[in-house]
């Protein structure tokens, strides 16, 4: 069996999907070998994960994106030629016309463009409509959470028996952060005070306005002790949200090498997202031993279980009250951190890869 995986998101700026593909392909290859797991475009090694830049050289990147454009918009089916010999083609949202001779599969990462279309640009909604057609044609699908599967069945009318739930994993670096790593990242980003952390792309769905407003309304004594730190690339945030970032310490995009120690350095991780298909930042914070305050929406209750404090993300008062209660209760934070580590242990890329290989064999 040879499995060809569409890896074109590794060539463009991307967050969650790029993270998923990078670690998923790496662990699939460890378990099944490079001859079994090939990519479109052909990438022998993935190098270092960088969400802002391509993981291939400039020439390979432009040639591969050109091949994708030829396949999507002309009669030339470059994807067919470049995946010849494969038994399975695992597509992403970027491929509009997958190979004709392969068993077609794909991963459903979330349904956010369908659930909250008003929070997404037209390009995102258009891409998700194309992916919906591909998902209906696929022989089998992976959903990264039960919530995502249920939403896909309900919204897109997909057959539930066609979808297998396989939770994503967490990079090993989040489970093994040293005190030296934490001290280094604190020094690099000039983080001298205890802090509350948010990590994610700055976009409407992440609900940063509510978090910044809630933090700003905390009692002065708490704001004197803690600062709010926001890390993540700028997405399609509104001018109002960009302006409100002045109420926090905004670090911008943080390299992958700094992300685990930055997360582990936080006193509390807060993620009031309106909808997530899996929620990598929440799972990563739990793995790093950081207590988590997150939303009671989307897949986040499923992923966090009883290891996090859940709150209505649309209620600034509820977010403020939870922040106040937790930041004044160090023993509660310690218990949450311990439960989070236990919960996060079930999200391992090795387990995800093994379940995925079973999924492909069963097809």
Image (spheres, helix red, strand yellow):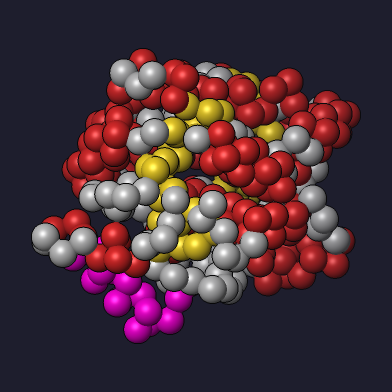
Say left or right for 157 vs 292: left
Number of callouts: 0
Q: Nearer the viewer, residue 352 or 322?
A: 352
Say left or right for 25 vs 163: right
Specify start and end residues of the magenta stretch as a single range: 55-70
- Residue 243 visible, this orientation: no
Residue occupying image coordinates x 29% and y 60%: 80
- Residue 156 visible, this orientation: yes
Task: Name the spot of residue 75 as percent of width and height, x first.
Answer: 11, 60
Based on the displayed image, in which of its 4 quarters is residue 41 positioned?
bottom left
Q: Is residue 146 above or below residue 345?
A: above
Say left or right for 341 vs 39: right
Task: Name the spot of residue 5 as percent of width and height, x first.
Answer: 45, 55
Q: Nearer the viewer, residue 160 or 240?
A: 160
Residue occupying image coordinates x 47% and y 19%: 161
Q: Nearer the viewer, residue 103 or 105?
A: 103
Q: Is residue 62 magenta?
A: yes
Based on the displayed image, in which of its 4 quarters is residue 81 positioned?
bottom left
Residue occupying image coordinates x 25% and y 65%: 78
Q: For the view shown, which residue lies furthest in the top direction? A: 154
Task: Name the spot of residue 8 as percent of width and height, x first.
Answer: 38, 61
Q: Is residue 8 magenta?
A: no
Magenta stretch, main secondary structure, is helix
Task: Name the spot of residue 140 as percent of width and height, x first.
Answer: 44, 33
Say left or right for 258 vs 272: right
Q: Is residue 186 above or below residue 116?
A: below
Residue occupying image coordinates x 79% and y 66%: 181
């Amino acid at each position: 069996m040879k499995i060809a995986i569409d890896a074109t998101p590794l060539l463009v700026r991307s967050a969650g999907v790029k993270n998923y593909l990078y670690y998923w392909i790496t662990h699939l290859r460890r378990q099944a070998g490079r001859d079994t797991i090939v990519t479109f475009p052909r990438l022998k090694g993935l190098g270092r994960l960088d969400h802002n830049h391509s993981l291939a050289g400039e020439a390979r990147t432009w040639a591969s994106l050109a091949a994708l454009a030829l396949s999507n918009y002309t009669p030339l089916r470059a994807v067919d030629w470049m995946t010849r010999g494969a038994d399975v083609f695992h597509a992403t949202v970027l491929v509009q016309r997958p190979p004709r001779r392969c068993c077609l599969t794909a991963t459903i990462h979330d349904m956010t463009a369908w659930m909250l279309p008003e929070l997404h640009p037209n390009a995102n909604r258009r891409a998700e409509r194309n992916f919906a057609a591909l998902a209906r044609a696929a022989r089998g699908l992976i959903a990264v959470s039960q919530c995502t599967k249920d939403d896909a069945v309900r919204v897109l009318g997909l057959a539930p028996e066609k979808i297998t739930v396989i939770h994503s994993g967490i990079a090993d670096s989040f489970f093994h952060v040293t005190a030296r790593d934490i001290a280094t990242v604190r020094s690099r980003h000039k983080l001298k005070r205890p802090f509350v952390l948010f990590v994610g792309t700055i976009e409407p769905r992440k609900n940063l306005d509510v978090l910044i407003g809630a933090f700003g309304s905390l009692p002065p004594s708490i704001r004197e002790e803690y600062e709010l730190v926001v890390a993540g690339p700028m997405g399609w945030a509104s001018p109002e949200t960009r302006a409100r970032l002045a109420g926090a310490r905004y670090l911008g995009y943080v390299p992958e090498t700094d992300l685990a120690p930055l997360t582990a350095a936080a006193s509390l991780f807060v993620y009031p997202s309106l909808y997530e298909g899996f929620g990598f930042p929440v799972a990563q914070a739990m793995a790093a031993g950081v207590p988590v305050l997150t939303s009671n929406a989307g897949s986040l209750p499923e992923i966090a279980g009883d290891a996090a404090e859940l709150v209505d993300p649309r209620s600034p008062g509820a977010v403020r009250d939870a922040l106040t209660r937790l930041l004044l209760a160090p023993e509660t934070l310690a218990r949450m951190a311990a439960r989070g580590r236990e919960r996060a242990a079930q999200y391992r890329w090795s387990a995800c890869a093994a379940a995925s290989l079973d999924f492909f064999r069963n097809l």
